[in-house]
Amino acid sequence: MFGDLPVAAGSFSQLIDNHIRLIYWICGVWFVLAQGVLFYALVRFRKKPGVRAAWLPGERRPELGWLLWPVALVFVCDMVIEWDSARVWAAVKEHRPQTTMEIGVMASQFAYEFRYAGPDGRLDTEDDIRSPELHVPLNEAVSLRLESRDVLHSLFIPQFRLKQDIVPGRQIRAWIKPTHEGRYVVACAELCGVGHSFMQSAMVVEPRDNFVRWTAEHATAAGGAR
C-alpha cells in the first residue's frame, strides 16, 4: 500500500507518511480483531436445534467487560493518534524554520502565478519576477505567501505532502524545504470552476546555482519587457 505513495521530496513528507502508517496499522489491527470476534460469535452462538436464544441485559461485570475494555483500548489508541498528529502539526505549522526567501503565489481561475523579488529584494514592486512555474533551490526552506484573485483554491503538491487552502481576501503562509531535485506537478485540490481539472503548473527543484541563473535570466527578461 505505502509503495503507491508519491516519492517523499520534502523535509516533512516522511513525518506525514509515518503518521498515515500509524493510523493504518492501528485501524488495521482493530479491523482484524473486530472481524475475528464477529466470526467467532457467528460460529459459537449460531442457531442450534432445541436451544433457545438467551437474553443478556449486559448488566453483569463479565458482560460489561466486553464493552468497557474495547472502549478503553480504543480511547488509548485515539490518544496515541492525537499525540502523534499534534507532534506532526507542530513540526509543519508551528515550528517553521528560517526561510531564505518568500515567494508570492497568486491563484486564479484557472492558473497559478509565482512571484519573486526582483533586484530591489522586495515583493510587490515593479521589478517582481513573474513565472507560471514554481522554481525553488534544493535543500533550502522557502516561504510561500498564498493569495487568490477570485474563488477558493487549494495549493497541492503531492510529493511534498503540501495541501493548503487559498482563501480570497486573505494572505496565507506555507513553507517547503525540497530534499530531492526534479520536476513536480502543482495542482489545485479545491473545485474552483469548470476549468478546475486543468489548473496545473510545475515545480522545479534545482541546485542553488541553477536557481540563481534562472532568476537572473527572468529578471533581465522582465526588465526588457517593461
Image (cartoon, rainbow, N blue to C red):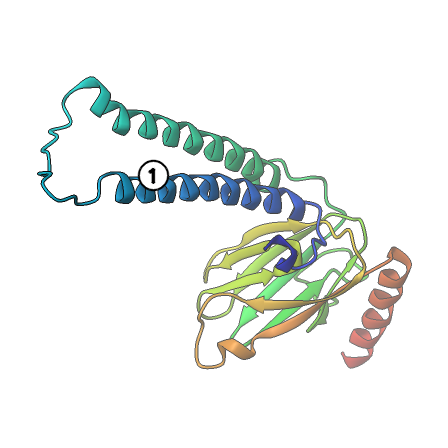
Question: In x, y percent, where is residue 24?
Answer: 51, 45
Which of the 4 quarters of the picture holds residue 210? bottom right
Who is closer to the viewer here, 166 or 36?
36
- Circle 1: residue type: Val
Which of the 4 quarters of the picture holds residue 120? bottom right
Q: Quadrant of the N terminus?
A: bottom right
Question: In x, y percent, where is residue 4?
Answer: 62, 60
Residue indicated by mark 1: 37
Question: In x, y percent, where is residue 180?
Answer: 79, 55
Q: Is residue 96 left or right of residue 139?
A: left
Which of the 4 quarters of the picture holds residue 219? bottom right
State the residue at coordinates (38%, 41%).
Answer: 36
Who is closer to the viewer here, 65 or 146?
65
Could you tell me how many numbered marks the image carries? 1
Who is closer to the viewer here, 16 or 55?
55
Who is closer to the viewer here, 50 or 55?
50
